[in-house]
Amino acid sequence: MKLIDFGVREDEKKYIQEWSKDNDIEVKIVTDLLTPETVKMAQGFDGIVAYQQLPYDEKIFDTMNEYGIHVISLRNVGVDNVPIEALKKNKIRLTNVPSYSPEAIAEYSVTGLMALLRNMKHMIRKVDQHDFRWVPDIGRELNQLTVGVAGTGRIGQAAIKIYQGFGAKVIAFDKFHNSEIEKEGLYVDSLDTLLKESDVVTLHIPSLGKGHTVINSQSISEMKDDAIVINTARGDLINTKDLYEAVASGKLYGAVMDVYENEVGIFNNDLTDEGLSDELLELVIKSPRFILTPHIAFYTTKAVKNMATISLDSMVDELKNGTSENEIDLDK
Ligand code: COI
């Protein structure tokens, strides 16, 4: 069996190499992203592993079919950049890593929130300028707030535990109820109710597709004054312009944005020389009330190792048994 792994970062290499040695399976490591051009490197391999934020071009899957490669394993969870119809057409199976570390993302939600509640961004900027005054950066305490967790999958469940540990009142919403959370009586009847009753809303749901936002001027108008939005999920869940205006006008307190609707090509790139031509993002970065980070909630040693190795394990299962527990149902 010969595998090829695309879009591999420096920090992932050692985990892939270790896995290759332990399993005695050849894995070619490629740093390039998977495109209609680079897929040509996969000729002669049995399976493709990849991770990228760049959308996967449909032509990639025609070429895979031509080469007789019928499995692609992603090192991440989200499949929103995969053209599912092209996979179906070419009879290509897809796996993801549904759970590499829910705790990494849940912990990051609270990390960002604490930074915002204690005005860390502004305070650190002031101290950098040798301004050591307290006022006006008085903090707020998490134990006095109601946190609304939207989405109670693995990440949402981990977030609930952490927020409860801080003494916050937690409420939750999901179309599919988890029995433990149900038993605790945390569910409210709709997302609208969650938005209305929360001081902090933390999003742990997948993308709803382009143009289908959860946080926009209409939903913001229903939210509590001084509420906070945390997004470690997908950028397109939020209309960023509406969110920015709500914070700038003082309706909302602030936001933690680890994802951004136009992040592809910006996040995880060094633009120090090139600069940034996205004015909205520039405003968000400047605002002390936005904690903006480049999609790093997942980025821990535990998660990266799991992403590298679980994707390869799934590939082996697919090639040996024709399926794996992480295969995505392309008809859903
Ligand atoms: C995903 O796993 O889909 C993520 O959003 C994390 C990614 C940046 C590796």
Image: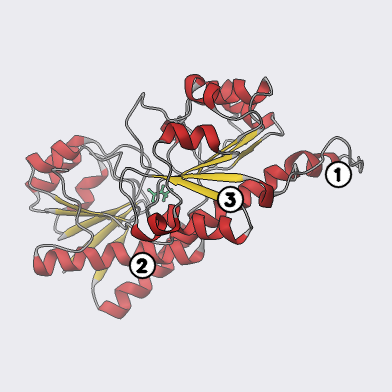
Q: Position of residue 22 (x, y in %)?
A: 31, 80
For residue 128, side relative to residue 329 (left or right): right
What kind of residue is marked 2?
A: Ile
What kind of residue is marked 1?
A: Val
Residue 311 or residue 15, whichever sits in front = 311
Q: Secondary structure at mark 2?
A: helix
For residue 108, side relative to residue 114 (left or right): left
Residue at 72% across / 34% down in the picture? 288
Query: Which quadrant, please, contains the N terminus?
Result: bottom left
- Can I make out residue 221 in this image? yes
Residue at 35% across / 38% down in the picture? 54
Per the image, the residue denoted by label 3 is: 169
Q: Position of residue 88 (x, y in %)?
A: 10, 42
Nearer to us: label 2 or label 3: 3
- What is the number of the mark on residue 17? none
> Dot 3 surroundings within 10 Å: few (below 14), some, or many (20 or more)?
some
The answer for how far apart the CA atoms under marks 2 and 1 are is: 42 Å
Q: Position of residue 330 (x, y in %)?
A: 15, 45
For residue 313, side relative to residue 105 (left or right): left
Which of disc 3 and disc 1 is earlier in sequence? 1
Tell me if label 2 and label 3 are in contact, CB under 8 Å.
no
Query: Which quadrant, please, contains the C terminus?
Result: top left
Per the image, the residue denoted by label 2 is: 16
User: Would you say the beta carbon of the disc 2 residue lies within 8 angstroms of ligand 1?
Assistant: no
Residue at 77% across / 38% down in the picture? 122
Q: Secondary structure at mark 3?
A: strand
Per the image, the residue denoted by label 1 is: 127
